[in-house]
Image: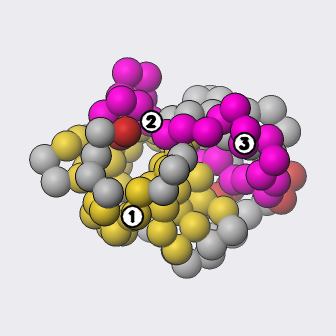
């Protein structure tokens, strides 16, 4: 499947402490189910390519899964919620990736600059 686009996107914010990062959910089934859970608060750990934490499973259309990601993608797959900020060059090795959204252009360095453990609230943009 090609990389999900902003078509049918829903504006959201990712708030970590005083830092607010604009983003958007795409039109995938999993993104629509995630939207139903908003606001959503989760504590994430920084790894080499992302911030991630285990999360309750959401309904997924397997035909919308892909291999790999682009830096700035937001994923919800394999029992994990993740904000992917690096590693796209080697991400093709990862299959079953469910991209549900994307951090707004120009905010990737803000994501990269967050602390090692962050509590993030995902909410609909007002």
Residue 94 visible (yes or no)? yes
Residue 4 visible (yes or no)? no
**Dot 1, crowdedness within 10 Å: few (<14), some or many (≥20)?**
many
**Dot 2, crowdedness within 10 Å: few (<14), some or many (≥20)?**
many
Q: Is residue 66 left or right of residue 35?
A: right
Q: Which residue is mark 3?
A: 91
**Dot 3, crowdedness within 10 Å: few (<14), some or many (≥20)?**
some
Q: Earlier in the sequence, mark 2 or mark 1?
A: 1
Residue 99 image point, x, y percent: 64, 47
Q: Quick check: 38 above or below 93?
A: below
Instruction: Please tell me whether residue 98 belongs to the stretch shown in magenta.
Output: yes
Q: Secondary structure at mark 3?
A: helix
Towards the viewer: 67 or 9: 67
Q: Which residue is mark 2?
A: 103
Q: Secondary structure at mark 1?
A: strand
Q: Which residue is mark 1?
A: 44
Q: Which residues are magenta?
A: 85-110
Q: Earlier in the sequence, mark 2 or mark 3?
A: 3
Q: Is residue 47 left or right of residue 7?
A: left
**To which quarter of the image does residue 26 belong?**
top right
Instruction: Please tell me whether residue 28 belongs to the stretch shown in magenta.
Output: no
Q: CA distance from mark 2 to mark 3?
A: 18 Å
Q: Earlier in the sequence, mark 1 or mark 3?
A: 1
Residue 126 image point, x, y percent: 25, 41
Residue at 13% over, 47% down: 18
Between label 2 and label 1, give the one nearer the viewer. Answer: 1
Q: CA distance from mark 1 to mark 3?
A: 20 Å
């Amino acid at each position: 499947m090609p990389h999900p686009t902003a078509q049918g996107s829903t504006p959201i914010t990712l708030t970590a402490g005083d830092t607010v990062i604009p983003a958007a959910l795409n039109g995938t089934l999993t993104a629509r189910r995630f939207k139903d859970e908003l606001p959503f608060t989760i504590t994430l750990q920084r790894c080499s390519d992302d911030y991630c934490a285990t999360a309750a499973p959401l309904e997924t259309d397997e035909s919308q899964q892909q291999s790999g990601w682009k830096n700035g993608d937001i994923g919800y797959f394999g029992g994990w919620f993740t904000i992917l900020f690096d590693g796209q060059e080697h991400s093709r090795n990862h299959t079953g990736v469910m991209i549900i959204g994307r951090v707004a252009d120009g905010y990737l360095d803000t994501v990269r600059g967050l602390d090692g453990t962050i509590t993030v609230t995902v909410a609909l943009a007002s």
